[in-house]
Image (spheres, rainbow, N blue to C red):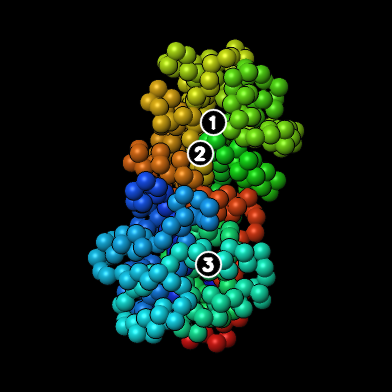
Amino acid sequence: MKDYFTMEDFDLKGKRVLLRLDLNSPINTETGEITDISRFIAHLDTLKNLRESKVVILAHQSRPGKKDFTSTKKHAEILSKLLRKPVLHLDGLFESFVIDKIKQMKDGDIIFLENTRFYSEDVVLAEEPLSVQKRSHIVKKLAPLFDYFINDAFAAVHRPQTTLVGFSEEMPNLAGILMDREISMLSKFLVDDSRPKIAVLAGAKVDDSLKVAKNFLDKNIVDKIITGGLVANLFLLAKNIDLGVTNVEFLNRELGDIKPLLEICNYLLSKYEDKIELPLDLAINKNDKREEISIDNLPIEHSIMDIGFNTIEKYKGILNGAKAVILNGPMGVYEIEDFALGTIEIFSAIADLNAFKVAGGGHTISAIARMDLNKKFTHVSVGGGALINFLSGEPMPVIDALKISKKKFTEVKL
Protein backbone atom coordinates (compact mmCIF):
# COMPACT_ATOMS: atom_id res chain seq x y z
CA MET A 1 0.00 0.00 0.00
CA LYS A 2 1.49 3.33 -1.09
CA ASP A 3 1.44 6.35 1.19
CA TYR A 4 0.21 8.57 -1.65
CA PHE A 5 -2.70 8.32 -4.10
CA THR A 6 -2.12 7.18 -7.69
CA MET A 7 -4.37 7.47 -10.73
CA GLU A 8 -5.50 3.88 -10.19
CA ASP A 9 -7.16 4.86 -6.90
CA PHE A 10 -9.94 6.90 -8.56
CA ASP A 11 -12.33 6.78 -11.50
CA LEU A 12 -11.25 9.89 -13.38
CA LYS A 13 -13.70 9.59 -16.27
CA GLY A 14 -15.65 12.83 -16.67
CA LYS A 15 -13.78 14.50 -13.81
CA ARG A 16 -12.10 17.90 -13.87
CA VAL A 17 -8.38 17.34 -13.38
CA LEU A 18 -5.71 19.95 -12.71
CA LEU A 19 -2.50 18.37 -14.03
CA ARG A 20 0.97 19.65 -13.10
CA LEU A 21 3.64 18.65 -15.60
CA ASP A 22 7.33 19.49 -15.90
CA LEU A 23 7.89 20.47 -19.54
CA ASN A 24 10.77 22.83 -18.79
CA SER A 25 12.82 22.29 -21.95
CA PRO A 26 15.84 23.62 -23.85
CA ILE A 27 14.85 26.48 -26.16
CA ASN A 28 16.68 28.10 -29.06
CA THR A 29 16.52 31.68 -27.80
CA GLU A 30 17.00 33.05 -31.34
CA THR A 31 14.02 31.25 -32.86
CA GLY A 32 11.97 30.42 -29.76
CA GLU A 33 11.77 26.79 -30.84
CA ILE A 34 11.88 23.96 -28.29
CA THR A 35 14.89 21.77 -29.15
CA ASP A 36 14.24 18.67 -27.04
CA ILE A 37 10.80 17.11 -26.50
CA SER A 38 11.87 14.17 -24.30
CA ARG A 39 9.99 15.53 -21.28
CA PHE A 40 6.80 15.84 -23.32
CA ILE A 41 7.10 12.20 -24.37
CA ALA A 42 7.72 11.15 -20.76
CA HIS A 43 4.28 12.53 -19.74
CA LEU A 44 2.27 10.93 -22.57
CA ASP A 45 1.18 7.86 -20.57
CA THR A 46 -0.41 10.10 -17.95
CA LEU A 47 -2.14 12.28 -20.55
CA LYS A 48 -3.46 9.31 -22.53
CA ASN A 49 -4.95 7.85 -19.37
CA LEU A 50 -6.91 11.07 -18.90
CA ARG A 51 -8.52 11.10 -22.35
CA GLU A 52 -12.04 10.92 -20.88
CA SER A 53 -11.39 13.64 -18.30
CA LYS A 54 -11.44 17.43 -18.51
CA VAL A 55 -7.73 18.26 -18.21
CA VAL A 56 -6.14 21.61 -17.40
CA ILE A 57 -2.33 21.69 -17.51
CA LEU A 58 -0.03 23.73 -15.30
CA ALA A 59 3.64 23.96 -16.26
CA HIS A 60 6.59 26.32 -16.02
CA GLN A 61 9.38 27.26 -18.41
CA SER A 62 12.68 28.53 -17.01
CA ARG A 63 12.61 31.39 -14.48
CA PRO A 64 12.44 35.20 -14.44
CA GLY A 65 15.54 36.87 -15.89
CA LYS A 66 16.58 33.93 -18.09
CA LYS A 67 16.62 34.17 -21.90
CA ASP A 68 14.42 31.09 -22.24
CA PHE A 69 11.77 32.45 -19.83
CA THR A 70 8.86 32.42 -22.22
CA SER A 71 5.21 31.53 -22.78
CA THR A 72 4.01 27.93 -22.78
CA LYS A 73 2.19 28.47 -26.11
CA LYS A 74 4.77 26.42 -28.06
CA HIS A 75 4.57 23.71 -25.39
CA ALA A 76 0.84 23.40 -26.03
CA GLU A 77 1.46 23.11 -29.79
CA ILE A 78 3.95 20.26 -29.27
CA LEU A 79 1.54 18.39 -26.98
CA SER A 80 -1.23 18.84 -29.52
CA LYS A 81 0.93 17.19 -32.22
CA LEU A 82 2.00 14.33 -29.93
CA LEU A 83 -1.55 13.63 -28.75
CA ARG A 84 -3.07 14.26 -32.19
CA LYS A 85 -5.82 16.35 -30.71
CA PRO A 86 -6.39 20.04 -29.93
CA VAL A 87 -4.70 21.46 -26.85
CA LEU A 88 -6.05 24.96 -26.22
CA HIS A 89 -3.49 27.41 -24.85
CA LEU A 90 -4.75 30.28 -22.70
CA ASP A 91 -2.44 33.22 -21.94
CA GLY A 92 -3.54 33.39 -18.35
CA LEU A 93 -3.62 31.35 -15.14
CA PHE A 94 -6.62 32.32 -13.02
CA GLU A 95 -8.15 35.34 -14.76
CA SER A 96 -11.91 35.42 -15.29
CA PHE A 97 -11.62 34.44 -18.99
CA VAL A 98 -9.59 31.39 -17.94
CA ILE A 99 -12.15 30.37 -15.34
CA ASP A 100 -14.98 30.78 -17.88
CA LYS A 101 -13.18 28.51 -20.38
CA ILE A 102 -12.56 25.86 -17.72
CA LYS A 103 -16.24 25.87 -16.75
CA GLN A 104 -17.21 25.30 -20.40
CA MET A 105 -15.00 22.22 -20.86
CA LYS A 106 -16.33 18.90 -22.14
CA ASP A 107 -14.92 15.42 -21.49
CA GLY A 108 -11.70 14.92 -23.46
CA ASP A 109 -10.89 18.65 -23.63
CA ILE A 110 -7.38 19.80 -22.75
CA ILE A 111 -6.47 23.35 -21.78
CA PHE A 112 -2.85 24.46 -21.26
CA LEU A 113 -2.44 27.50 -19.01
CA GLU A 114 0.30 30.14 -19.14
CA ASN A 115 3.78 29.70 -17.67
CA THR A 116 3.12 29.48 -13.93
CA ARG A 117 6.29 31.44 -13.17
CA PHE A 118 4.85 34.49 -14.94
CA TYR A 119 2.96 34.80 -11.63
CA SER A 120 5.00 35.86 -8.62
CA GLU A 121 3.10 33.61 -6.20
CA ASP A 122 4.63 30.54 -7.82
CA VAL A 123 8.12 31.87 -7.16
CA VAL A 124 8.12 33.98 -3.98
CA LEU A 125 5.93 31.69 -1.83
CA ALA A 126 8.17 28.65 -2.34
CA GLU A 127 9.65 28.90 1.16
CA GLU A 128 6.31 29.56 2.84
CA PRO A 129 4.33 26.83 4.66
CA LEU A 130 1.31 25.17 3.04
CA SER A 131 -0.99 27.25 5.22
CA VAL A 132 0.25 30.36 3.38
CA GLN A 133 0.43 28.79 -0.08
CA LYS A 134 -3.15 27.58 -0.01
CA ARG A 135 -4.29 31.19 0.56
CA SER A 136 -2.59 32.29 -2.68
CA HIS A 137 -4.67 33.56 -5.58
CA ILE A 138 -3.47 30.61 -7.68
CA VAL A 139 -4.93 28.06 -5.26
CA LYS A 140 -8.03 30.00 -4.19
CA LYS A 141 -9.10 30.72 -7.78
CA LEU A 142 -8.29 27.33 -9.35
CA ALA A 143 -8.96 24.77 -6.60
CA PRO A 144 -12.79 25.14 -6.57
CA LEU A 145 -12.93 24.28 -10.28
CA PHE A 146 -11.43 20.78 -9.99
CA ASP A 147 -12.09 17.34 -8.54
CA TYR A 148 -8.45 16.19 -8.48
CA PHE A 149 -4.90 17.53 -8.69
CA ILE A 150 -2.49 15.18 -10.43
CA ASN A 151 1.23 15.84 -10.05
CA ASP A 152 3.39 14.25 -12.73
CA ALA A 153 6.26 16.76 -12.46
CA PHE A 154 8.95 14.50 -11.06
CA ALA A 155 11.77 16.68 -12.39
CA ALA A 156 10.49 19.41 -10.02
CA VAL A 157 9.77 17.10 -7.09
CA HIS A 158 12.35 18.90 -4.93
CA ARG A 159 10.72 22.34 -5.46
CA PRO A 160 8.17 23.56 -2.87
CA GLN A 161 6.43 25.97 -5.26
CA THR A 162 2.77 26.85 -5.08
CA THR A 163 1.68 25.05 -8.27
CA LEU A 164 3.48 21.92 -7.06
CA VAL A 165 2.43 21.65 -3.41
CA GLY A 166 -0.20 24.33 -2.74
CA PHE A 167 -3.24 22.23 -3.67
CA SER A 168 -2.48 19.32 -1.32
CA GLU A 169 -5.16 20.17 1.25
CA GLU A 170 -7.75 21.50 -1.19
CA MET A 171 -8.48 18.29 -3.11
CA PRO A 172 -7.03 14.80 -3.44
CA ASN A 173 -3.51 14.99 -4.89
CA LEU A 174 -2.52 12.00 -7.02
CA ALA A 175 0.84 10.94 -8.42
CA GLY A 176 0.77 10.76 -12.20
CA ILE A 177 2.09 7.67 -13.99
CA LEU A 178 5.57 9.15 -14.52
CA MET A 179 5.75 10.43 -10.93
CA ASP A 180 4.67 7.07 -9.51
CA ARG A 181 7.14 5.17 -11.71
CA GLU A 182 10.04 7.43 -10.69
CA ILE A 183 9.27 7.21 -6.97
CA SER A 184 8.78 3.44 -7.14
CA MET A 185 11.92 2.69 -9.13
CA LEU A 186 14.27 4.98 -7.22
CA SER A 187 12.87 3.83 -3.87
CA LYS A 188 13.35 0.24 -4.96
CA PHE A 189 17.04 0.89 -5.64
CA LEU A 190 17.50 2.48 -2.22
CA VAL A 191 15.86 -0.39 -0.30
CA ASP A 192 16.71 -3.33 -2.58
CA ASP A 193 18.65 -6.01 -0.68
CA SER A 194 20.18 -7.50 -3.84
CA ARG A 195 23.95 -7.57 -3.55
CA PRO A 196 26.40 -6.55 -4.78
CA LYS A 197 24.91 -3.10 -5.34
CA ILE A 198 27.01 -0.50 -7.13
CA ALA A 199 26.77 3.23 -7.82
CA VAL A 200 28.61 4.71 -10.79
CA LEU A 201 29.10 8.42 -10.05
CA ALA A 202 30.94 10.40 -12.69
CA GLY A 203 30.61 13.46 -14.90
CA ALA A 204 31.12 17.10 -13.99
CA LYS A 205 28.54 17.71 -11.24
CA VAL A 206 30.89 16.79 -8.43
CA ASP A 207 28.95 18.39 -5.57
CA ASP A 208 25.85 16.36 -6.53
CA SER A 209 27.83 13.12 -6.78
CA LEU A 210 29.47 13.67 -3.40
CA LYS A 211 26.08 14.23 -1.74
CA VAL A 212 24.84 10.95 -3.19
CA ALA A 213 28.07 9.12 -2.32
CA LYS A 214 27.91 10.26 1.30
CA ASN A 215 24.29 9.16 1.70
CA PHE A 216 24.94 5.81 0.00
CA LEU A 217 28.03 5.02 2.07
CA ASP A 218 26.82 6.35 5.42
CA LYS A 219 23.65 4.25 5.10
CA ASN A 220 25.35 1.21 3.56
CA ILE A 221 23.08 1.43 0.52
CA VAL A 222 25.83 0.33 -1.91
CA ASP A 223 28.86 -1.94 -1.74
CA LYS A 224 31.01 0.03 -4.17
CA ILE A 225 31.19 3.45 -5.79
CA ILE A 226 32.86 3.61 -9.18
CA THR A 227 34.12 7.08 -10.13
CA GLY A 228 34.86 8.80 -13.42
CA GLY A 229 35.06 12.28 -14.91
CA LEU A 230 35.71 15.21 -12.60
CA VAL A 231 34.41 13.16 -9.65
CA ALA A 232 37.36 10.78 -10.04
CA ASN A 233 39.81 13.63 -10.59
CA LEU A 234 38.78 15.33 -7.36
CA PHE A 235 39.12 12.11 -5.36
CA LEU A 236 42.60 11.63 -6.83
CA LEU A 237 43.49 15.17 -5.80
CA ALA A 238 42.17 14.45 -2.31
CA LYS A 239 44.61 11.53 -2.15
CA ASN A 240 47.44 14.03 -2.76
CA ILE A 241 47.92 12.89 -6.34
CA ASP A 242 49.00 15.99 -8.28
CA LEU A 243 47.01 16.19 -11.52
CA GLY A 244 49.07 19.04 -12.97
CA VAL A 245 48.39 22.77 -13.08
CA THR A 246 46.15 22.58 -16.16
CA ASN A 247 43.81 20.03 -14.59
CA VAL A 248 43.72 21.61 -11.14
CA GLU A 249 42.94 25.00 -12.68
CA PHE A 250 40.18 23.38 -14.72
CA LEU A 251 38.65 21.90 -11.55
CA ASN A 252 38.73 25.30 -9.86
CA ARG A 253 37.21 26.95 -12.91
CA GLU A 254 34.41 24.39 -13.30
CA LEU A 255 33.61 23.76 -9.63
CA GLY A 256 34.43 27.07 -7.95
CA ASP A 257 36.12 26.79 -4.57
CA ILE A 258 37.13 23.11 -4.41
CA LYS A 259 38.26 23.16 -0.77
CA PRO A 260 34.84 22.18 0.69
CA LEU A 261 34.52 19.43 -1.93
CA LEU A 262 38.00 18.11 -1.10
CA GLU A 263 37.00 18.00 2.57
CA ILE A 264 34.03 15.76 1.70
CA CYS A 265 36.30 13.55 -0.41
CA ASN A 266 38.76 13.28 2.47
CA TYR A 267 35.95 12.35 4.88
CA LEU A 268 34.67 9.64 2.53
CA LEU A 269 38.16 8.27 1.85
CA SER A 270 38.98 8.19 5.56
CA LYS A 271 35.90 6.06 6.31
CA TYR A 272 35.21 4.15 3.10
CA GLU A 273 38.38 4.03 0.99
CA ASP A 274 37.89 0.32 0.31
CA LYS A 275 34.48 1.06 -1.23
CA ILE A 276 35.52 3.94 -3.51
CA GLU A 277 37.04 2.84 -6.81
CA LEU A 278 39.40 5.29 -8.54
CA PRO A 279 41.10 5.15 -11.97
CA LEU A 280 44.37 3.29 -12.49
CA ASP A 281 45.08 5.21 -15.68
CA LEU A 282 43.71 8.16 -17.62
CA ALA A 283 43.37 9.34 -21.21
CA ILE A 284 44.81 12.77 -21.94
CA ASN A 285 44.47 15.10 -24.90
CA LYS A 286 47.96 15.31 -26.44
CA ASN A 287 48.07 17.24 -29.70
CA ASP A 288 44.33 16.54 -30.23
CA LYS A 289 44.85 12.78 -29.89
CA ARG A 290 44.12 10.26 -27.16
CA GLU A 291 47.13 9.15 -25.16
CA GLU A 292 46.87 6.97 -22.06
CA ILE A 293 49.01 7.43 -18.96
CA SER A 294 49.24 5.63 -15.64
CA ILE A 295 48.27 7.48 -12.46
CA ASP A 296 51.95 7.00 -11.50
CA ASN A 297 52.92 9.34 -14.35
CA LEU A 298 50.97 12.30 -12.96
CA PRO A 299 51.26 15.28 -12.84
CA ILE A 300 50.69 16.07 -16.50
CA GLU A 301 50.08 19.38 -18.19
CA HIS A 302 47.72 17.95 -20.82
CA SER A 303 43.98 17.86 -20.17
CA ILE A 304 42.53 14.68 -18.62
CA MET A 305 39.64 13.63 -20.88
CA ASP A 306 38.67 10.04 -20.04
CA ILE A 307 39.52 6.97 -17.98
CA GLY A 308 42.15 4.64 -19.42
CA PHE A 309 41.89 1.07 -20.76
CA ASN A 310 43.17 -0.59 -17.56
CA THR A 311 40.58 1.33 -15.54
CA ILE A 312 37.86 0.25 -17.96
CA GLU A 313 38.83 -3.40 -17.48
CA LYS A 314 39.01 -2.96 -13.70
CA TYR A 315 35.57 -1.31 -13.57
CA LYS A 316 34.01 -3.94 -15.84
CA GLY A 317 35.36 -6.63 -13.51
CA ILE A 318 33.76 -4.91 -10.50
CA LEU A 319 30.44 -4.53 -12.33
CA ASN A 320 30.38 -8.17 -13.43
CA GLY A 321 27.86 -10.00 -11.28
CA ALA A 322 26.30 -6.86 -9.80
CA LYS A 323 22.62 -7.28 -8.91
CA ALA A 324 21.73 -3.59 -8.81
CA VAL A 325 23.46 -0.58 -10.40
CA ILE A 326 22.72 3.13 -10.49
CA LEU A 327 24.45 5.24 -13.14
CA ASN A 328 24.87 9.01 -13.04
CA GLY A 329 27.45 10.73 -15.21
CA PRO A 330 29.76 9.88 -18.13
CA MET A 331 33.34 8.66 -17.67
CA GLY A 332 34.85 11.45 -19.71
CA VAL A 333 34.30 13.90 -22.57
CA TYR A 334 32.16 11.42 -24.49
CA GLU A 335 31.06 14.04 -27.04
CA ILE A 336 34.55 13.80 -28.63
CA GLU A 337 35.04 10.44 -30.34
CA ASP A 338 38.62 9.91 -29.13
CA PHE A 339 37.50 10.27 -25.53
CA ALA A 340 34.20 8.38 -25.62
CA LEU A 341 35.74 4.95 -24.99
CA GLY A 342 35.33 4.93 -21.20
CA THR A 343 31.70 6.01 -21.36
CA ILE A 344 30.83 3.58 -24.18
CA GLU A 345 32.49 0.60 -22.50
CA ILE A 346 31.14 1.18 -18.97
CA PHE A 347 27.61 2.12 -20.09
CA SER A 348 27.49 -0.93 -22.39
CA ALA A 349 28.76 -3.21 -19.63
CA ILE A 350 26.02 -1.98 -17.28
CA ALA A 351 23.35 -2.29 -19.99
CA ASP A 352 24.32 -5.94 -20.58
CA LEU A 353 24.07 -6.90 -16.90
CA ASN A 354 21.25 -9.13 -15.70
CA ALA A 355 20.48 -6.70 -12.89
CA PHE A 356 18.22 -3.90 -11.66
CA LYS A 357 19.66 -0.94 -13.61
CA VAL A 358 18.74 2.70 -13.06
CA ALA A 359 20.25 5.70 -14.86
CA GLY A 360 19.68 9.44 -14.71
CA GLY A 361 21.12 12.89 -15.29
CA GLY A 362 21.13 14.98 -18.46
CA HIS A 363 24.46 13.86 -19.94
CA THR A 364 23.84 10.26 -18.88
CA ILE A 365 20.46 10.17 -20.64
CA SER A 366 21.99 11.80 -23.72
CA ALA A 367 24.79 9.23 -23.89
CA ILE A 368 22.41 6.31 -23.35
CA ALA A 369 20.13 7.59 -26.12
CA ARG A 370 23.10 8.11 -28.46
CA MET A 371 24.15 4.50 -27.83
CA ASP A 372 20.55 3.26 -28.18
CA LEU A 373 20.66 1.55 -24.77
CA ASN A 374 17.41 2.90 -23.27
CA LYS A 375 15.54 -0.39 -23.50
CA LYS A 376 18.34 -2.24 -21.71
CA PHE A 377 17.90 -0.21 -18.51
CA THR A 378 15.21 -1.03 -15.97
CA HIS A 379 14.55 2.68 -15.52
CA VAL A 380 15.93 5.91 -17.00
CA SER A 381 15.00 8.84 -14.79
CA VAL A 382 13.94 12.24 -16.18
CA GLY A 383 15.13 13.94 -13.00
CA GLY A 384 18.25 16.08 -12.76
CA GLY A 385 18.38 17.94 -9.46
CA ALA A 386 15.31 15.99 -8.37
CA LEU A 387 17.10 12.68 -8.88
CA ILE A 388 20.16 13.87 -6.94
CA ASN A 389 18.07 15.16 -4.04
CA PHE A 390 16.08 11.91 -3.93
CA LEU A 391 19.21 9.75 -3.88
CA SER A 392 20.87 12.06 -1.32
CA GLY A 393 18.02 11.56 1.13
CA GLU A 394 17.09 15.25 1.07
CA PRO A 395 13.55 16.58 1.59
CA MET A 396 11.13 16.02 -1.27
CA PRO A 397 8.39 18.67 -0.85
CA VAL A 398 6.17 17.33 -3.64
CA ILE A 399 6.21 13.77 -2.29
CA ASP A 400 5.51 15.14 1.19
CA ALA A 401 2.54 17.06 -0.26
CA LEU A 402 1.21 13.88 -1.90
CA LYS A 403 1.42 12.08 1.45
CA ILE A 404 -0.27 14.95 3.29
CA SER A 405 -3.10 14.87 0.76
CA LYS A 406 -3.64 11.13 1.09
CA LYS A 407 -3.85 11.43 4.87
CA LYS A 408 -6.40 14.21 4.62
CA PHE A 409 -8.59 12.69 1.91
CA THR A 410 -8.40 8.96 2.66
CA GLU A 411 -11.62 8.98 4.68
CA VAL A 412 -13.47 11.06 2.10
CA LYS A 413 -12.11 9.14 -0.87
CA LEU A 414 -14.62 9.34 -3.72
Q: Nearer the viewer, residue 75 or 401?
A: 75
The amino acid beneath tag 1 is: Gly
Quadrant position of residue 206: top right
- Give the spatial CA distance, label 2 vs label 1: 8 Å
* Image coords of residue 246 (percent x, y): 59, 19
**Residue in the picture at 40% in, 55% down:** 39
Above-or-below relation of 393 to 1: above
> Label 1 belongs to which residue?
229
Q: CA distance from mark 3 to mark 2?
A: 35 Å
Marked residue nearer the N-terminal end (3 or 2):
3
Q: Quadrant of the N terminus?
A: bottom right
Question: Mark 2 sits on what residue?
Answer: 329
Please, which residue is most extreme toward the left here?
A: 84
Q: Are the residues flagged by discs 2 and 1 in contact, CB closer than 8 Å?
A: yes
* Secondary element type, mark 2: loop
Earlier-in-chain disc, 2 versus 1: 1
- Residue at horizontal 46 percent and vertical 44 percent from the top: 362
Residue 131 percent coordinates (x, y): 66, 76
